[in-house]
Structure formats: structure tokens, C-alpha cells
Amino acid sequence: MKKLFSVMLVIINLNCFGQSKNWFVSFSIAPVFGGPSASLKSQMRAQGYGDHAESTFDLFGSGNTSYPRGGSVAFLARGGKKINDHKCIYFVAGISEKATIEGFHAQGWSDGFFGLFAGTYGEHVSVSYTTYQLTAGYMYSFPNSRAKIGVGPSVYLLSYSNAFNYIKNETHASLVPGASFTTRLPLGREKKLFGIELVFEGNMAPPVKMKSDHTEGFEPKSANMFSANAGFAFTFRK
């Protein structure tokens, strides 16, 4: 399935570059809000994996880590071909979310080795996941404005694995349909071959029921598939 997404991304980019006029290709890296990370953190807290871990290194100081922790990021490519002055067909492909969410349940305190490397010990759990996205739709622009808004159907592939005390388990995957909307705001003149744009992407899909490989520890229930990302995109136009 990952190979299929890669092939489709190549086809999309080749199609855009094959046009002599009125096409664009952009690439962005942006933080993600919502999505599986938000629901996983909430479930970890509810199951007792939201404790603090304190570590003391004597001469080197000490540290305190709050759980659950972890943030997600999106790596997306967009391409499109202008149909008329206010409408174009566009594609989005790539990774809409990638993250590792960690939780910790404290069970006691260890004095370490002669007072060195003392700290809290307990159960460490994590869920690593990647959400692949493929979208095709129409994008509209408005008179006397550089802002553009697009919407279209999407398909998402959620690949994830659980770990208990740093021992990774089997990788699972779920394919779900959904929808996506995109907002692009070019910064500067669009007549230039290269430019920077402010982009916003919203994704919507039904929640995914997650599987657990553990007889103990954290048991993920479901992953929220409503998410958004915002950031800057590097864009090529012709």
C-alpha cells in the first residue's frame, strides 16, 4: 500500500510538470492539531499513563518529564492544473500525520547507583503511527483576492504499532475514506516561478478502531481522524 501511494505521487507530479502553462507544485512541512495524537493522549491519561517521570543525575542536574507527550507533523505535496481564471483541479499526497505518543505510569523510586542516576521507574507505553493521505478535488479562487480554497474526497491509510516497556509489537493498518479542504494564500506575486505560500489543510474521516497486542498495559481504543495543519509551502509555478 505504501508503494501504491508513492507511485500515485510520482504520477501526479509528472502530470503537473508535463503541462506547459498554469500549473503548480508545492511542498510543505507543518505541525498538526487534533487527529490520533489528541485521542491517544486522552486515552493514556484515562488509563493511568499520565504521570511525571523525575530523573536525578547528581552533578549533571535533574529533569522532570510530563506524560503523555509527543506531537505530530505533516509532510505533504500538492499539485494542480488551472481550468479557468477561478478554478483548478488539484491533488494532495503524502503524510498528513506522523508521531510517536508516549505514556508513563509511575510505580516507585530508584536510588540508582550510589545516588547517581536516581529516578522514577514504572511502565512506559507508546504508539507510533503514520497517516498517509491522497486527495483529489477542485480549488476555487476569488476576484481581487489571492486566496484559494479547495475541497475534495480523500483516502487515508493509518499505519500504527504499540510498544510496552520499549518492546515494539505488530504493525497494523486501516484504510478509511474521508474528505479534505485546503486553503492557499500566496505571499507575493504569483507570476514568479518560485514562491512561498501560507497553507491550511483540514482532514475529516470516521474514527479508526485500533488494535492492541498487549494483555497488560495501555490499550488504545480508537483514533480520531479529524485534524488540521497549517504552515508554509514552497511552490513552483508555470
Image (cartoon, rainbow, N blue to C red):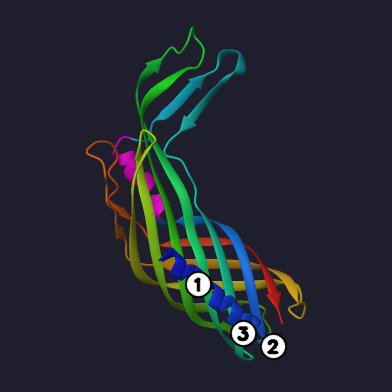
Chief SS of the magenta region: helix
Q: Nearer the viewer, residue 16 or 187?
A: 16
Mark 3: few/some/many CA within 10 Å (<14, 14-19, 20+): few
Indicate yes or no whether the magenta region holds residue 42.
Answer: yes
Q: Is 84 left or right of 32, judged from the image as shown?
A: right
First reached walking from the N terminus: tag 1 or tag 3: 1
Eye-nearest disc, 2 or 1: 1
* Mark 1 residue element: helix
Q: Is residue 35 above or below residue 202?
A: above
Indicate yes or no whether the magenta region holds residue 174.
Answer: no
Numbered range of the magenta stretch: 36-48
Question: Label 3 amino acid?
Answer: Phe
Q: Is residue 95 above or below residue 194?
A: above
Q: In whole angstroms, how far apart are the C-alphas of marks 2 and 1?
A: 22 Å
First reached walking from the N terminus: tag 2 or tag 3: 2
Q: In whole angstroms, how far apart are the C-alphas of marks 2 and 3?
A: 24 Å
Q: In whole angstroms, how far apart are the C-alphas of marks 1 and 3?
A: 33 Å
Which residue lies under the disc numbered 2?
20
On residue 142, the disc is: 3
Question: Label 2 amino acid?
Answer: Ser
Image quadrant occupied by the N terminus? bottom left
Which residue lies under the disc numbered 1?
7
Eye-nearest disc, 1 or 3: 1
The residue lying furthest to the bottom in this view is 84
Question: Label 1 amino acid?
Answer: Val
